Image (tube, coloured by chain):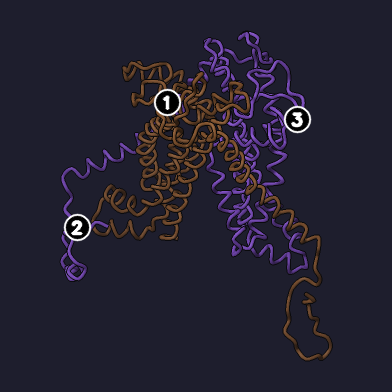
Chain colours: A purple, B brown
Amino acid sequence: MSPPSPPADAAAATVQVGAPTIPTTPRGARLKELAFQGGMLACLGVALITLAAVLIQVFTKGVGQLDMNFITDLGSSIPENAGIGSALVGTLWVIGVCIAFIVPVGVASAVYLEEYADRSRWYNRFIEVNIQNLAAVPSIVYGILGLAFLVRGPLSLGHVVLAAGLTLALLVLPVVVIAGREAIRAVPPSIREGSMALGATKWQTIWKQVLPASIPGFATGVILAVSRAIGEAAPLIVVGGAIYLSFYPSGLGSDFTVLPLQIFNWISQPQEEFKNLAAAGMIVLLAILLVLNAVAIWLRNKYEKKW
Amino acid sequence: MDAVTRPQGDAAPRTLVLGAARRRWGEDAIKAALFAAAVISVLTTLGIVASLLGETIKFFQDVGVGSFITDGDWKPLFADPQFGIWPLINGTLLVTGIAILVAIPVGLGSAIYLSEYASPRTRRAIKPVLEVLVGVPTVVLGFFALTFVTPTIVHDFLGLDVQVFNALSAGLVMGIMIVPTIASVSEDAMSAVPGALREGSFGLGSSKLQTSTRVVVPAALSGIVAAIVLGVSRGIGETMIALIAAGQIPNTGLNPTQPFETITTFIGATAKGDNPAGTTGYYAIFACGMTLFVLTLIMNVIAIRFVRKYRQAYE
């Protein structure tokens, strides 16, 4: 890229090939190299140390609050009585709705785009670009979508579990589709050709051969999507989660709160006790995410197939 | 359609056309159902645009595009409300600016190290940790900014006279949040630079440092630009860190130790308080959402362009 000799025209450069200027190692070169490597390690260090500091801060603040009562107690305006019970049940409901939506729709979209879509058609390319762009839309904008279309407007569901679950589902759908497409693409064409040659129809091939082989990839995608959805607070603030719930959410039409929302509301309280409760809630939230990610990694390693 | 021709007896050989023996309606129905599922994502985009556009138009009937852009004051809840978005844009740019000042060196340094220096084993150990950083919910990062970075780092360690809510802590933590985005996208770009370029550089006697900074980085520049643009777009769209740690006071200044309000925090804070539907303050949520959507969409389109550029060059 940067020629050792001063810039000359191309002809002169080729002529000089016989007598190249041998670059001499400047005296400070070794030192510079070390400083550069040190700098890069420091960069990585900043990121890793911050991560560690986040975990330590959350753990030291919250561990004192963590007991069985904290897990089962309902929301309350008195710190001693407050727990994450209703938020935990709310998260289960909301994520349940989310999974019920993203699994069929995500799989079907991925299958369509990989197996059926004719890329020479503009509308298929449009769907692809659209999914890419959706993945970059800020999560709070999905909250506005949920507010305008699901909570009020055409569907008018109200501030309920179903509206929250669908909002999160739309938010994380691109994750499932993108992961699913990669999983399908990893199934070699010879499997499809073999199936077709034995007389299977296209759908029989997909249903009996391609999909079973790509289940681990889909599962990983769904878990990643779910772990993103579990941690999202911003869109659900807009959709209208409760400040605190004094009962367990009991169905699709029930008022809701979820873990990150409960945590956020505790952080917003002026009392220090609530900040500690928030930290305890974060420990639970992070533990759930850790388990989910461990499952995803285990799935990827166990079922990773070499064709 | 009757495509399969069975050669029978000594009939003259005919061209064999392979295909389905008959039209299978079930197959067609399945294809249509799958297409319908894929269209849901397009409907989502249309839904976003429609929900933003309808209320934004109502907002502009009350406020006027001119005063939205040029008014210097954002006071949506005053008796005489003013809706000039500049203070919110100022807050967004300041917090994102601080974040990107942290994220560019840290992210790029990490990416160069992972791509050019680290052994495969180190890479395998460090990349999952960066992925963990992506997975930390932003509400946790906001809490960290408020309860640790502000009092311990900014106030005690840096000795700055900060307010409880300030743009600096929010920006610093947001920067760390963006690091994995910048690191992984630019590392992809650097790994896509063909080995021959590096070997050529070494062959001319360059050191590893020179090869990394003068050959690999320039060759991967379009990918690095894409990474930075994506990082900026993530910062602009991030809500919780600023909502928790940056305060909610519209501010046209540039002093990062003061509280600021960003576009996203206005949306979050206003939607949380029960702003009755139908007021101008309620419509302001949608106008802000529209601003945010347009900003991030433009950035994403730019980023995709740049990524395509290096893919075309090297793959």
Quarter holding residue B232: top left
Residue A294 is left or right of residue A61, and the answer is right
**Chain of the residue displaying label 2:** A
For the point 81% across and 90% down, the residue is: B11
Front tag of 3 and 2: 3
In the displayed structure, A135 sits above or below A14; it is: above
Q: Does dot 2 land on a helix, a strand or a loop?
A: loop
Furthest-right residue in this view: B9
Both on one chain, marks 1 and 2? Answer: no
Front tag of 3 and 1: 1
Q: Kindly identify which residue carries mark 1.
A: B73
Q: Spatial distance from mark 3 to mark 2, Cα to Cα?
A: 70 Å
In the displayed structure, A52 sits above or below A200; it is: above
Question: So how many labels did they put on this image?
Answer: 3
Front tag of 1 and 2: 1
Q: Is residue B175 visible?
A: no
Q: Does dot 3 land on a helix, a strand or a loop?
A: loop
For the point 73% across and 20% down, the residue is: A248
Q: Quadrant of the N terminus of chain B?
A: bottom right
* Mark 3 Cα shell of 10 Å, populated few (<14), some (14-19), many (≥20): some
Q: Are marks 3 and 1 in contact (CB under 8 Å)?
A: no
Q: Kindly identify which residue carries mark 2.
A: A4
Q: Kindly identify which residue carries mark 3.
A: A252
Q: Quadrant of the C terminus of chain B?
A: bottom left
**Chain of the residue displaying label 1:** B
**Chain of the residue displaying label 3:** A
Both on one chain, marks 3 and 2? Answer: yes
Percent coordinates x, y for residue A127 in the rendering: 60, 53
Q: Are marks 1 and 2 in contact (CB under 8 Å)?
A: no
The kind of residue tagged 2 is Pro
Percent coordinates x, y for residue B262 in the rendering: 46, 29
The kind of residue tagged 1 is Asp
